[in-house]
Image (tube, rainbow, N blue to C red):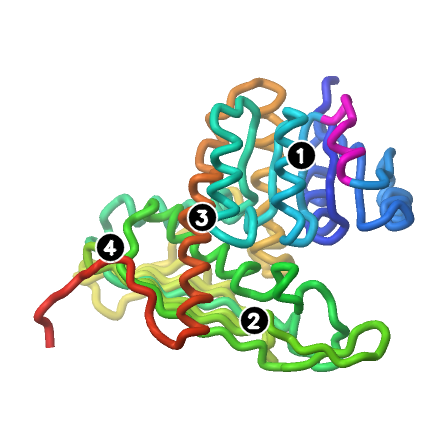
């Protein structure tokens, strides 16, 4: 049986998400791993029965046997790693965000013009059955003209004030929830509505716990965001609001509310998708969704990492058959430029304490 040989750069998301997803695909062979050092690569290769441990990402990318490279290292390394992988002419999946700024994304977009291998950013929620169902409902016009989207995501990852310093708390390495999570929520808007023109962006960022101890016992200032909120105004009177808190003391949440002039849609991890229509005000209609993993229905797995399981077999099939139709909705490098333009604006707005204006949009409502 022909198999797709996969190399993973990174031992965090690469193991939790990519390895776990591809291990469910019979024709996928996770063949090589690269961590921050050869010792770490060897440790994870042995622990997860991966044949090859590489000393650095160049060694992995240079391997002739590798078909697909997954770039899952810390954000600050994505630019150089993707650039190198492009030169080796491999299929590439890069973890979100593609890079840390829109300008870097534009550079990679120019470098990848005409690239004939699979190349996309891992915004795996696009392949989740619940998220796809929401897109179908929006496109069906059941909700009418959409005017407001509210997104809320919270988790406990940064809640422990005794958690030691890591790259996730380091702004210079691309840490913080603005890049980690706001990139996902911005991409949801892109997936559902396309890259529609932005009018203005207002952002707020806060690290909450202002210092963390590093491994040597020294206090280090935290500048990367634990909390991110944003108000984004688009053309045609569409507004999106999202709140992200990685330092929550409650349970994890992921909530979606979409308001249209004919109806409303809600999603939560507990209740999944519900509809409320104008002709049945106050009546809740449960929307059934097929082909969902049972552990996801029962909230035993994160919808974020768990969604890669829907994408992994499609990628392998696309490589083996050279038919990419099933992964056409994956986030492109062009999408990354749009996404990071909004994320850059959130940062600028938060630090200047004023909205970033892209274009004018006025009305006379009171």
Q: Residue furthest left?
A: 364
Residue closest to the eye, 272 or 5: 5
Instruction: Quote the CA–CA distance across marks 3 and 1.
Output: 40 Å
> Is most of the magenta stretch helix, strand or loop?
helix
Instruction: Quote the CA–CA distance across marks 2 and 1.
Output: 29 Å
Q: Quadrant of the N terminus?
A: top right
For label 1, the residue is: 84
Instruction: Quote the CA–CA distance across marks 3 and 2.
Output: 34 Å
Residue 310's place in the image compared with 324, above or below, is below
Q: Tell me if I can see residue 315 in this picture.
A: yes
Q: Which residues are magenta?
A: 57-66
Sooner in the amino-acid sequence: mark 2 or mark 1: 1
Number of on-image labels = 4
Residue 203's place in the image compared with 275, above or below, is below
How many neighbours does mark 2 have within 10 angstroms: few (below 14), some (14-19), or many (20 or more)? Answer: many
Q: Are marks 3 and 1 in contact (CB under 8 Å)?
A: no
For label 2, the residue is: 225
For label 3, the residue is: 289
**Point 36% across, 69% down: residue:** 202
Sooner in the amino-acid sequence: mark 1 or mark 4: 1
Sooner in the amino-acid sequence: mark 3 or mark 4: 4
Name the spot of residue 312 as percent of width and height, x first: 62, 37
């Amino acid at each position: 049986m022909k198999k797709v040989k996969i190399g993973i750069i990174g031992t965090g998301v690469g193991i939790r998400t990519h390895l776990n997803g591809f291990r469910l695909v019979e024709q996928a062979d996770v063949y090589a791993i690269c961590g921050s050092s050869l010792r770490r690569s060897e440790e994870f290769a042995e622990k997860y029965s991966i044949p090859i441990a590489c000393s650095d990402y160049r060694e992995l990318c240079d391997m002739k046997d590798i078909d697909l490279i997954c770039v899952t290292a810390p954000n600050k390394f994505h630019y150089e790693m993707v650039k190198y992988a492009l030169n080796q002419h491999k299929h590439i999946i890069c973890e979100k965000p593609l890079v840390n700024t829109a300008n870097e994304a534009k550079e990679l977009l120019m470098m990848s013009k005409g690239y004939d291998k699979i190349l996309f950013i891992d915004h795996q929620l696009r392949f989740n059955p619940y998220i796809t169902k929401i897109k179908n409902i929006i496109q069906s016009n059941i909700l009418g003209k959409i005017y407001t989207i509210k997104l809320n995501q919270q988790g406990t990852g940064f809640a422990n004030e005794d958690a030691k310093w890591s790259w996730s708390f380091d702004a210079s390495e691309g840490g913080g929830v603005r890049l980690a999570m706001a990139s996902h929520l911005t991409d949801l808007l892109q997936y559902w509505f396309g890259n529609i023109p932005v009018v203005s962006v207002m952002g707020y960022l806060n690290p909450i716990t202002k210092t963390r101890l590093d491994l040597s016992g020294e206090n280090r200032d935290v500048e990367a965001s634990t909390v991110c909120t944003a108000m984004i105004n688009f053309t045609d009177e569409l507004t999106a609001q999202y709140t992200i808190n990685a330092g929550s003391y409650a349970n994890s949440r992921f909530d979606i509310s979409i308001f249209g002039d004919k109806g409303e849609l809600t999603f939560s991890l507990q209740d999944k998708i519900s509809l409320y229509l104008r002709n049945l005000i106050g009546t809740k209609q449960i929307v059934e969704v097929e082909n969902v993993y049972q552990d996801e229905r029962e909230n035993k797995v994160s919808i974020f990492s768990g969604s890669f399981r829907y994408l992994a077999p499609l990628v392998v099939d696309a490589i083996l058959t050279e038919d990419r139709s099933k992964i056409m909705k994956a986030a492109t490098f062009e999408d990354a430029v749009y996404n990071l333009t909004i994320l850059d604006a959130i940062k600028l707005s938060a630090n200047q304490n004023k909205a970033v204006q892209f274009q004018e949009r006025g009305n006379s409502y009171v």
